[in-house]
């Protein structure tokens, strides 16, 4: 299939899977070298950018995010902005003010979140790369549910200039694709220092040379609470890794269980301050009643356009930042982050990576998700949150399929700045893994 | 979390809640805060870095420049004579 064939089919593919919120009207690729899409929380100067929120409806940024500008400069054509949970607040891409993407392997199931549209696009469009953004697992989770490879690099590796912030101490831009080799190829384009994002300025050289992965550590706490099918598929994957010459050891990592509450304290605290800027002026909807006093005006616009989960996280984050009861948790959450970093680094002194399934179950059906409480949904992130709170690079790799044909993913976690060893194991794995492509009939 | 606390937090965050929302968030936030109590058991650490990596020596000189066309920035804003319109202050 040529790029022009893909361009011609794009609208029909989107009508079926709903991966794009905004997309190009072009039906040919022009002189593009490759097609790409991005999560809709990255600003693009030629497409509306809403980050899944109705409060930003109509927002047309005047500039490209740094990563989008770099991909365009490398010959990429941006074809769509991908549906996502509002501001990244979710595990299934169902907390959106707009379209909810459908899983490529079963339209009645979710793509995972919050970069669900991006993983969907990477799965259903041939030769496609999509940028995702992870705060607590938003690249790994949808990559796992959609059966594709997803890399979340080290915090600070990719400039966040042009990213609509969720949690500043957590947000990371990464890459999702059907091909492991694409992750290195496109990360090489978007990684690097950018003085407009100070956290990108401390990064060491981005290494890409092959470095064989010799050993992994599987935390016992990372294989608790799994569905039977995920557990069985993961065990088979471990046997395969051993056959590939990788030593597998089981280790204890008791601090993992504190990552989830610590993450939600930090993430919602930061989110509640970041979302304070959306008040019905400058961005998106601005049609409030100007005769109201400013407090009432801001409140009216925010109450009308923020979705359910955005309101929940703003309330939670505002409370945790308050002095007293909430503030105590915030201080402790920052300590827990350091404990988790130390624990990872200690294990990674003697192992190349820490490995566990990416998600405890495969993509759930929409009717199952609608029955989950907010806390149930937060708890589903317990395997992806630890690496995210520690800011260390991780990659979800497809490792098998359950009895319904839904993909299972495993997640390799390496030390800060060691993306190279993740690329290497993914490429070795890809050579022997029988990746299933979804049947894309339009 | 009791109803009064959630109401106070919502007011502070500029969110107006219906009675139905108030009841729902009260229950959700209570469940979540109860779960967060797990943090009390977590090991202590005398470090509390803001970022997961060390970010230092990154200060640079400010260099004034115009990167964007101001008309483009104002394009979709509600304006009056190139001022952004907003609610009254008092």
Image (cartoon, grey):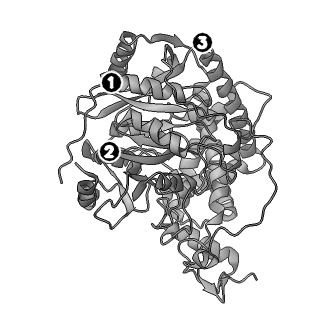
Q: Which residue is mark 2?
A: A127
The spot of residue A411 in percent (x, y) is: 46, 28
Q: State which chain disc 2 sits on.
A: A
Residue at position x 59%, y 32% in the image: A392
The spot of residue B50 in percent (x, y) is: 74, 41
Splitting the image into 4 quarters, where does residue A315 fall? bottom right
Question: How many badges with numbers are in the image?
Answer: 3
Residue sitting nearer the eye, A185 or A198: A185
Asked if one can make out residue B1 in the rendered structure from this viewpoint, the answer is: no
Q: Which residue is mark 3?
A: A350
Splitting the image into 4 quarters, where does residue A442 fall? bottom left
Left or right side of B11 for A436: left
Asked if one can make out residue A198 in the rendered structure from this viewpoint, the answer is: yes
Whether tag 1 and tag 2 are in contact, CB under 8 A, the answer is no
- Is label 3 or label 1 in front? 1
Whether tag 3 and tag 2 are in contact, CB under 8 A, the answer is no
Q: Which residue is mark 1?
A: A431
> Upstream in the sequence, badge 1 or badge 2?
2
The spot of residue B89 in percent (x, y) is: 74, 81
Q: Are marks 1 and 2 on the same chain?
A: yes
> Upstream in the sequence, badge 3 or badge 2?
2
Please determine whether, in this image, residue B81 is positioned above or below residue A427: below
Please determine whether, in this image, residue B49 is positioned above or below residue B8: above
Residue at position x 72%, y 50% in the image: A321
Please determine whether, in this image, residue B10 is positioned above or below residue A195: below
**SS type, badge 3:** loop
- Marks 3/1: CA–CA distance: 26 Å
Residue at position x 24%, y 41% in the image: A438
Residue sitting nearer the eye, A132 or A186: A186
**SS type, badge 2:** loop
């Amino acid at each position: 299939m040529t790029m022009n064939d893909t361009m011609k089919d794009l609208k029909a593919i989107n009508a079926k899977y709903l991966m794009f919120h905004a997309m190009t009207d072009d039906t040919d690729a022009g002189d593009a070298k490759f097609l790409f899409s991005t999560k809709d929380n990255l600003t693009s100067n030629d497409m509306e950018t809403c980050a899944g929120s109705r409060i930003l409806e109509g927002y047309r940024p005047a500039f490209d995010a740094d990563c989008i500008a770099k991909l365009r400069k490398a010959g990429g054509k941006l074809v769509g902005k991908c549906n996502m949970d509002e501001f990244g607040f979710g595990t299934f891409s169902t907390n959106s003010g707009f379209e909810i993407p459908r899983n490529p392997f079963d339209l009645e199931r979710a793509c995972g979140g919050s970069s669900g549209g991006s993983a969907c696009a990477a799965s259903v469009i041939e030769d496609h790369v999509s940028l995702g953004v992870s705060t607590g697992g938003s690249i790994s989770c949808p990559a796992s549910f959609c059966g594709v490879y997803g890399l979340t690099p080290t915090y600070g590796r990719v400039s966040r200039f042009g990213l609509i912030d969720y949690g500043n101490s957590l947000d990371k831009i990464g890459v999702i694709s059907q091909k492991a080799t694409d992750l290195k190829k496109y990360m090489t384009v978007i990684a690097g220092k950018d003085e407009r994002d100070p956290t990108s300025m401390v990064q060491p050289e981005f290494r890409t040379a092959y470095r064989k992965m010799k050993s992994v550590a599987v935390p016992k706490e990372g294989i608790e609470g799994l569905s039977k099918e995920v557990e069985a598929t993961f065990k088979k994957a471990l046997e395969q890794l051993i056959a590939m010459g990788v030593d597998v050891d089981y280790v204890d990592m008791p601090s993992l269980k504190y990552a989830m509450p610590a993450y939600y304290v930090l993430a919602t605290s930061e989110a509640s301050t970041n979302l304070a800027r959306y008040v019905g002026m400058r961005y998106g909807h601005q049609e409030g009643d100007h005769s109201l006093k400013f407090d009432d005006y801001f409140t009216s616009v925010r109450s009308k356009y923020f979705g359910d989960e955005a309101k929940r996280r703003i309330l939670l984050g505002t409370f945790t930042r308050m002095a007293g009861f909430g503030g105590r948790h915030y201080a402790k959450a920052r300590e827990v982050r350091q404990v988790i970093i130390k624990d990872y680094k200690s294990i990674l002194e003697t192992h190349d990576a820490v490995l566990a399934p990416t998600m405890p179950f495969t993509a759930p059906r929409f009717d199952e998700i609608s029955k989950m409480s907010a806390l149930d949904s937060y708890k589903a992130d317990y395997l992806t949150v630890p690496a995210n709170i520690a800011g260390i690079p991780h990659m979800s790799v497809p490792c098998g399929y359950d009895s319904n044909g839904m993909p299972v993913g495993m997640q390799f976690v390496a030390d800060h700045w060691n993306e190279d060893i993740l690329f290497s194991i993914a490429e070795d794995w890809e050579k022997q893994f029988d990746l299933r492509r979804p049947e894309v009939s339009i | 979390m009791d109803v009064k606390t959630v109401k106070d937090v919502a007011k502070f965050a500029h969110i107006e809640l219906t009675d139905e929302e108030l009841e729902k968030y009260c229950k959700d936030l209570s469940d979540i805060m109860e779960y967060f109590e797990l943090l009390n058991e977590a090991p202590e650490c005398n470090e509390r870095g803001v970022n997961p990596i060390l970010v230092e020596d990154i200060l640079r000189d400010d260099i004034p420049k115009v990167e964007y066309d101001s008309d483009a920035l104002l394009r979709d804003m509600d304006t009056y004579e190139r001022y952004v319109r907003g609610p009254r202050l008092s």
